[in-house]
Amino acid sequence: MEVGDNGGRVILVSGATGQQGGAVARSLLERGFAVRGLTRDVEKDEARELAGLGAEVVNGDLEDRSSIERVLEGVHGVFSVQQFMEVGVEGEVRQGVQLADAAKEAGVEHYVYTSVGSAHRDTGIPHFDSKYEVEEHVRASGVPYTVLRPVFFMQNWEYMREPILGGTLPQPLDPDKPFQMVAVEDIGVFAAMAFENPEGWIGREVDLAGDELTMPEIADTFSRVIGRQVDYFQTPWDQFEEQMGEEYTVMYRWFDEHGYEADIAGLRKEHPGLISFEQYLSTHGWENSGSPSEG
């Protein structure tokens, strides 16, 4: 690949072996950036795969300030993501604050923080509010920043593959309520666009979505792509809470009562290749056979 102006700019990608970090790292590498992928385990398959694509994969711990300072040396930009499911909302805030402070001190020129769609709307969802707390700290830190707020990942449907392939899409949501989704690949594209064009992106806070469908429309899309009938089943709320727990029930009730508000038409103008839900399914192993996903 011919490296342009991006080649001399090293971007530290936290969570580089996760869904968002991996997508961002690949998108940056495709655009000729130098990528330093941060992970706690450089021997993981995902870490080896990134290294094979040309990333420098380094070991580091977001709980350890000296570890962060070491991997920030010579870095132009940072992509910051934390995982509340691993460390809880308090750990997420602690790690997000620490990475932002270290980046500011290291003189990082562009800090892209990935939050969650509608974090700024006082949702009352604990792991949305924690991300907004990190956002507020990033803004106050003085580091030149961009905030990306992705909505529900299309990749999350992979966890429901079994019932869907069995013909049922079970969710508790109102069948008339539109539901926004985004492919993680598009989070990678927007992060790379931000690093590539800092003049247009520093100071921006953008909700990211690629499609908006009701649950019956989602079921119909599955039906078309996998080649068998899939029907929407509206799960009773008490049954959903029993299966998924309080945190996710709070989130889904918010989906039902309010919902995400990303400007999909505006995003498509900036990124015409924005992935629709049907495109996502067709390129992630759902088509016809419904065979296990490759990715």
Image: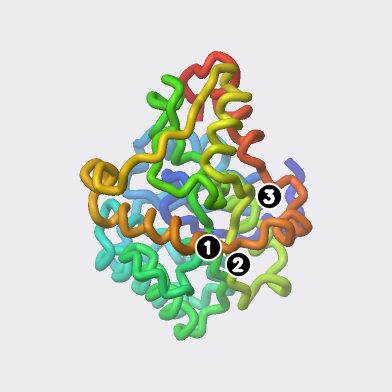
Query: Mark 3 and 2 residues: CB-CB less than 8 Å, in contact?
Result: no
Q: Earlier in the sequence, mark 3 or mark 2?
A: 3
- In the image, which disc is placed on residue 129? none
Front residue (pair 145, 51): 145
Q: Earlier in the sequence, mark 2 or mark 1?
A: 1
Q: Amino acid at mark 2?
A: Val
Determine if residue 69 is in view: no
Determine if residue 35 is in view: yes
Residue 212 percent coordinates (x, y):
61, 49
SS at mark 3 in the image? loop
- Report the residue at 40% width, 69% height from top: 123
Q: Amino acid at mark 1?
A: Arg
Residue carrying label 2: 206
- In the image, which disc is placed on residue 149? 1
Judge depth for marks 3 and 2 and give the one in front. 2
Is residue 173 depicted above or below 254 in this figure?
A: above
Q: Quadrant of residue 69?
A: bottom left
Quadrant in the picture for the N terminus:
top right
Residue carrying label 3: 32
